[in-house]
Amino acid sequence: MPQGSHRTFDVAVAGGGIIGLAVAWRAQRHGLKTVLLERDARVAQGATHAAAGMLAPVSEANVAEQELLRLGLESAARYPAFVAELAEQSPLDAGFLRCGTLVVARDRDEAEALDRERDARARLGLEVERLLPSEARRREPGLAPTLRLALDVPEDHAVDPRGLAAALADAFARAGGDLRTGTPVARVTTSATGERVSGVELDDGERIAAAQVVVATGAWTQALGGIPTAARVPVRPVKGQILRLRDPAGPGLFTRVLRMDPGYLVPRGDGRYVLGATMEERGYDTDVTAGGVFELLRDASELVPGISELVLEELEAGLRPGTPDNAPALGPGALEGLHWAAGHHRNGILLAPVTADLLLASLTGAPLGELATPFTPDRFTTTPTKDVAA
Ligand code: FAD
Ligand code: GLY
């Protein structure tokens, strides 16, 4: 039998976005025979393809959501080791950039709000530095002179999600994992008694036997069949329009992630930049609109006037996977053998390393620890029943 081809698997992962890829790689590296099933012809064409790649637990945090902040800080701390381990397994560059972040205010109201944000972060012991406009512009000369205030967040970095996904897919395959693209999963299958999972059935009727199944189907999770209604985690799509730009003159217009209210600019370090993003509740609509693009460009060029000289390379809308509380569902659910890695909403790139580690614990029956308690899938589900949703 060729390497990576097994009739039955220890683990089947449904969905080849950043989350499914990270979990599958971790599981395979640990010695679990893993198959990754991705519906599209290539991996990571969903939210991961659109994502900017900010690793921004401090600057993006809603300090009222301290459990998510703690999870994000933990994942950010694991990033250097995660990408270093990946680099040992794959020659593909994940595009991890230790660039830091500036959060900026453009008028008095925004400056007052930023000071409140700084105080809230200081109370939590998070490292931020208040910068007057002159110092902010000394550090980032591309910023407009109209800037009112900035916070320097030195430990919020960035990664290229497309590069990271390609490296994870490559490392997974090199580790002997079975990566199947163009393979939509129709439903999770269960044992005769319906009490535990037995694998998955594909759209074409083929069955794949697996002792455990991981749901990593992003914003499309509701369409995955075979999961009892009472054991489901509800996930909805949250649209984000985003632009990709390139400076023909090369890198240097700005070197840090720049965050404003409500958008952001992310440098890739090579003259490419990402400008995002809208937040829209529009179901599965992925149209890019004139209004969305106009607002993003208007806000960004007010902050960094040089933006208007850049080449517009790509317009895209992606669908963030959101649960009712906008926090992920991580670990075992109500149906035995079924594990959730879904609903990462605005932070799936940041949370990939910690998700992979927690899901490995879940798959091997190890304790997930206190960090994972607030994210248990059970918070959305009721007692398991045997009625199976189509
Ligand atoms: P996805 O990447 O959507 O992957 C799900 C995969 O499952 C897809 O490949 C899909 O084809 C596949 N699939 C679905 N159904 C099936 C099926 N039945 N069978 C087989 N395969 C299936 N996060 C950050 O941390 N930092 C950021 O800067 C950031 N910026 C963002 C900007 C935008 C505009 C958007 C939209 C998102 C952003 N995010 C960011 C959020 C991040 O992109 C998501 O949280 C993350 O990509 C979710 O990963 P995922 O693997 O769960 O979902
Ligand atoms: N985390 C950035 C976004 O979701 O747009």
Image (spheres, rainbow, N blue to C red):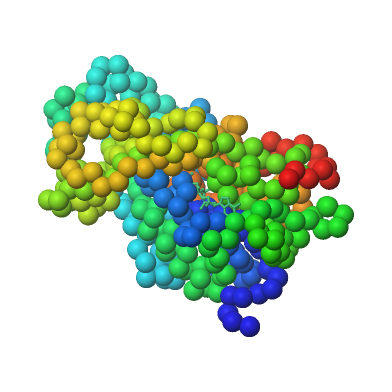
Does residue 64 appear left or right of residue 272 in this picture?
right
Quadrant of the image for the C terminus?
Answer: top right
The residue under the point 40% across, 67% down is 87
| Outermost residue toward the top in this view | 109
In this image, 361 relative to 354: left or right? Answer: right
Quadrant housing residue 232: top right
Residue 108: horizontal and vertical position, in percent? 25, 17
**Numbered circles on residues, count:** 0
* Residue at 40%, 52% in the rendered image: 161
Does residue 47 appear anywhere in the picture? yes
**Furthest-right residue in view?**
193
Decide: is 295 above or below 357.
Answer: above
Q: Residue furthest front?
A: 204
Position above or below: 226 against 282:
below
Place of residue 65 in the rendered image (x, y in percent of width and height, measured from the top left): 52, 31
- Answer yes or no: is residue 152 visible: no
Please name the residue shown 58% across and 79% down the image.
3
Q: Residue at x 53, y 63 (%)?
A: 181
Q: Is residue 384 left or right of residue 377?
A: right
Residue 175 location (% of width, % of height): 52, 73
Q: Which quadrant is home to the N terminus?
A: bottom right
Q: Measuring from the top left, give residue 45's x and y in whole percent.
A: 45, 52
Task: Out of 29 and 13, give the one closest to the viewer.
Answer: 13
